[in-house]
Image: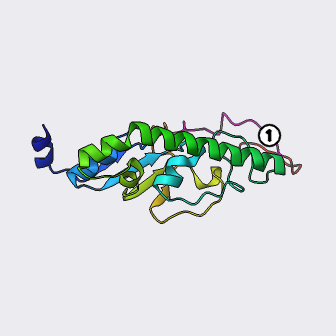
Amino acid sequence: MRTSTLRTQYEGLLVDPMVQCGDLLAQVLGIPLIFSLRFSFGYTIERFCGQLPTPASYVPASPVQFSDRMSFVQRLKNVLLYTFHSLLFYIHTTVNWDHYYSEILGKPTTACEVMGKADLWLIRTNWDFDYPRPLLPNFQFVGGLHCKPSNPLPAVSSSTLLPCECSLGFTLSPK
């Protein structure tokens, strides 16, 4: 199966980095890798594998509902959450995935090292909804990428419009 997959000429691979081994497949096939991600908890994948700078004192951790204007106690909780998520991610990848990646590639490597070679990271949100932070050139916001197309709005005839009074004090009515 591996030889038939290698013979097939793919243009690239679009995967979610929360599901492991897509990056490994792209590296084995020698094709461009594109990640499509909403967020990882504590932005761990983006920070460690994508090298995205996310200051813990300014950008709230992803499952928390803090704003970018945090009090001291909220900043402390945020830093502790970043630390917790970082440790959990490090232990999870070291124990479960790093030896597998090294075995497949035939050389000592880590999951983050392979994921860090992604050509493009598509962040499935809108810049307006996310916290302002520095972004690398290969990180792009693509809000609505996975939304189904909307139906066209129904046509509105002037007979269905009722007179309405606007907040400026004048009345609109159909002719």
Its colouring scheme is: rainbow
Mark 1 = which residue?
164
Residue 10 drawn at (x, y percent): 20, 50
Residue 170 magenta-highlighted: no
Task: Tell me the amino acid under the disc marked 1.
Answer: Cys
Residue 158 magenta-highlighted: yes
Q: Secondary structure at mark 1?
A: strand
In the image, 27 versus 149, the foreground residue is 27
In the image, 161 versus 65, the foreground residue is 65
Tell me if I can see residue 18 in this picture.
no
Q: Residue furthest bottom?
A: 137
Residue 9 drawn at (x, y percent): 15, 51
The residues colored magenta run 153-166
Q: Quadrant of the C terminus?
A: top right
Residue 27 drawn at (x, y percent): 27, 52
Total number of numbered discs in the rendering? 1
Q: Main secondary structure of the magenta part?
A: loop
